[in-house]
Amino acid sequence: MGGVIDFVMFLLVATNLALLESSRLKTCIWLVAFQGMALGFLPVLVGYSHAGEIGLHAVFVGLISIILKGIIFPLLLMLAVHKANVRREIEPFVSYNVSIIIGVAALAASIWLSRYLNIPASAGGSLAVPLAFFTIFVGLLIITSRKKAITQVVGYLVLENGIFTFGFAVMPHAPFVVELGILLDLLVAVFVMGIMILHISATFDHIDVSRISTLGDE
């Protein structure tokens, strides 16, 4: 089972790096959807690794996570991309090559930080905590370094995936209501952000947040 969890961790790193170098919005959406679906198996894998059995609670949380992150959120974002009629993030605040370099440095820093803090991982293997830190950092980097509102929503989802990974690595048996509440909050947040993107596109004919911030000076 440990090998399967390590494979999920490998997918987490690969999708994070691919997100940092991709300018196509639809590609970014499919990448974060794939990442969310892969992490949806984590509750079952971690639960079995930790307790030696597959609990109903873990199956339900994983299923809800896969449905929301792998199907519903991507469909909402694809709808926003279609309505806004945008395809690429052309000129981000931080270039894609520099983003990859920062990402690799963040991966090394995350490994060092996890060893320095010495956070015990109850399950998920030794890679889960550092890669959770790495995923959180990648989410923050995407939110702060991209201009398109849709890409920033993708960064928000990556950030939540990092928190999700950290939670199941450190607290594999967190209360079910807490996990469900977090996923419900995420659903509401993505739904509201999707509506905001549609309104921004309809009002300003673009979804570039850097241009919106200068409207007060025009």
Image (cartoon, helix red, strand yellow):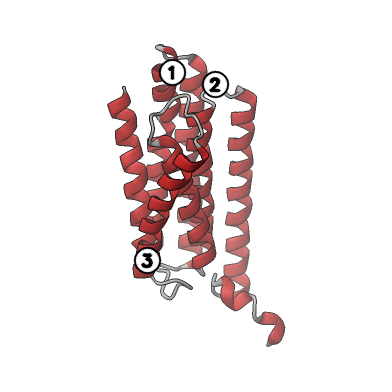
Q: Which residue is mark 1?
A: 50
User: Mark 3 near mark 1, Cβ–Cβ under 8 Å?
Assistant: no
- The type of residue carrying mark 1 is His
Circle 1 packing at 10 Å, graded few (<14), some (14-19), many (20+), is some
Q: Which residue is mark 3?
A: 23
Q: CA distance from mark 2 to mark 3?
A: 38 Å
Q: CA distance from mark 3 to mark 1?
A: 39 Å
- The type of residue carrying mark 2 is His
Query: Looking at the picture, does residue 7 appear above or below residue 89?
Result: above
Q: Picture quarter containing residue 102?
A: bottom left
Query: Looking at the picture, does residue 201 appear above or below residue 110?
Result: below
Residue 36: x and y in percent read 43, 41
- The type of residue carrying mark 3 is Ser
Circle 3 packing at 10 Å, graded few (<14), some (14-19), many (20+), is many
Q: Which residue is mark 2?
A: 173
**Quadrant of the snapshot with the C terminus:** bottom right
Q: Tell me which numbered mark, 2 or 3, is placed earlier along the sequence.
A: 3
Residue drawn at the location 51% of the way across and 70% of the way down: 147
**Quadrant of the snapshot with the N terminus:** top left
Q: CA distance from mark 2 to mark 1?
A: 9 Å
Element class at badge 3: loop
Instruction: Work out which residue is located at the far front of the displayed protein and give it.
Output: 116
Query: Looking at the picture, does residue 165 appear above or below residue 113?
Result: above
Q: Picture quarter containing residue 4?
A: top left
Residue drawn at the location 48% of the way across and 73% of the way down: 93
Residue drawn at the location 47% of the way across and 46% of the way down: 113
